[in-house]
Amino acid sequence: MRVRHTPDIRLRLPSTVSIRPFHFFALLPAALLCAWINAASAATPDDAPSATGLKGRLIVGYQGWFGCPQDVPGNTYWEHWFYKNNASADNLAVDLLPSVSQFRAEDLCPTQLRRKDGSTINVFSSQNARVVATHFRWMRDHGIDGAAVQRFVGPLATPALKQRSDRVLKNARAAAEASERIFYLTYDVSGADANTVVADIRRDWQYLVRDLKITASRSYLHVNGKPVLQLWGFGFNDRPGSATAVAALISDLKNGRDNLKATTLIGGVPSNWRTLDGDSQSDRRWAEVYRSYAVLSPWSVGRFRDDAGVDKFVRERVLPDMEETKRLGIGYMPVVFPGFSWFNLQTGRGQKNLAIINQIPRRCGNFLWRQVSSLLGARVDMLYAAMFDEVDEGTALFPTEPREARLPKGAQMAFLNQDGCVLDDDWYLRITGKAAHFLRRNEVPPAKLDSVMRP
């Protein structure tokens, strides 16, 4: 998730991942594959979504990477909230402040942050099962189908970090089952070791299936009996993985070879996957790799910043992409995002030139809705919303503080009312739920957000 030059503003990890103090943790007939993707009827608005099929789904990305000291025995570190393991305004690593009024006090982590009125600011840990359960309950309450749970490959080599990633996945499984939402796993290769990334995924997928039995969950999304798995980041020009090794991995995962459970694969690919330029590696071998996935989900965060940019992206990228995926008989899941801000993240990294507050304004939800209405108008039949809980880069959809007065004293952060709105903290969950509503019914929504909902 990045902005500068090639504006891929997904979280950029350094080539050598620092563990502390800030953790960052082919082949079947095309026609049959397409039939799999479109399998299963869409749920009615009041029904729990079936754990089968992708058509008509709106899936949110779920990072689950937040932590605080003593969230589990032995942990003494803040994860993703602060730099330097110091819970102060000067060391903030996030640009949006989560709204935590619906959590129990004992499930929150106190910080050194204070509002102007002197009140204490608390945050949460994704290690807490009750916190994750609340997140998935919000998805249910707003009609969002479920979540793609991120699992970063790099930290899996460190036992303590792997245990934390395991715990988040277990929490998400229990939460999805309790809230009758669907979920599936996304391997994110950002920051992974280029020499071992493919082998690490092979080994970990065996572990998750055999030991954690994650795909046995009644809520784990399947297509034609195969669990859905997403590989995010292969082929980007700043991510690891050779075309040859990735092609072999995809083939084995699709066909259940080399002791791997067969899957239906989603490729989280560069926005320029079709043209092999910009954010994509230019090696022609990647063209075949991209086209070997069952579903393509090109990353669009940061590729545009206003309505004109949305329209141009849809015209020049999405429509040709749809034509190509239709020809190939594979699915197409574009990404939508509400806005972007990463001032504190970049300040903490010493990248002052990239530290911009409210870099892509949300415009009270109109920016997100322009994407939704344009894509559904193009007859897209599945969507990925980035991201549910990404406050680091300001793309979070879950409740965050609308008012500047509720922000930490001495901090520089974005807030929901920044563009002249008066909003409730769950405004973006409500918009996302409306998008899911129209998508589920295969309907083209009104172009204007105020025709759909009111603050």
Image (cartoon, helix red, strand yellow):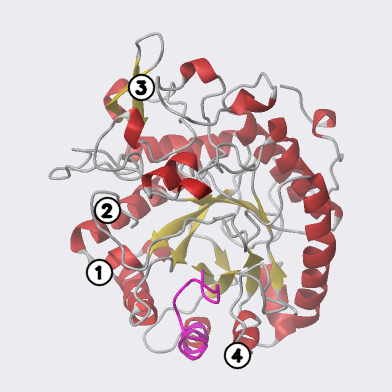
Name the element at disc 1. helix
N-terminal of the two: label 3 or label 1?
3
Mark 4 is on which residue type?
Arg
Is residue 143 positioned above or below 421 on the image? below
Mark 2 is on which residue type?
Arg
Q: Which residue is mark 3?
A: 121
Mark 3 is on which residue type?
Ile
* Circles 1 and 2 in contact, beta carbons < 8 Å: no
> Could you tell me how far apart the alpha carbons at marks 3 and 1 are, in whole angstroms?
34 Å
Tell me residue 71's x, y (percent).
23, 39
11 relative position to 440: left or right: left
> Could you tell me how far apart the alpha carbons at marks 4 and 2 are, in whole angstroms?
36 Å
Which residue sits furthest left? 74
Q: Which residue is mark 1?
A: 157
Name the element at disc 3. strand
Name the element at disc 2. helix
N-terminal of the two: label 4 or label 2?
2
Residue name at image x 46 percent, y 59 percent = 12
Q: From the viewer's perspective, is the residue at label 2 or at label 3 nearer?
A: 3
Q: From the viewer's perspective, is the residue at label 4 or at label 2 nearer?
A: 4
Based on the displayed image, in which of its 4 quarters is residue 202 positioned? bottom left
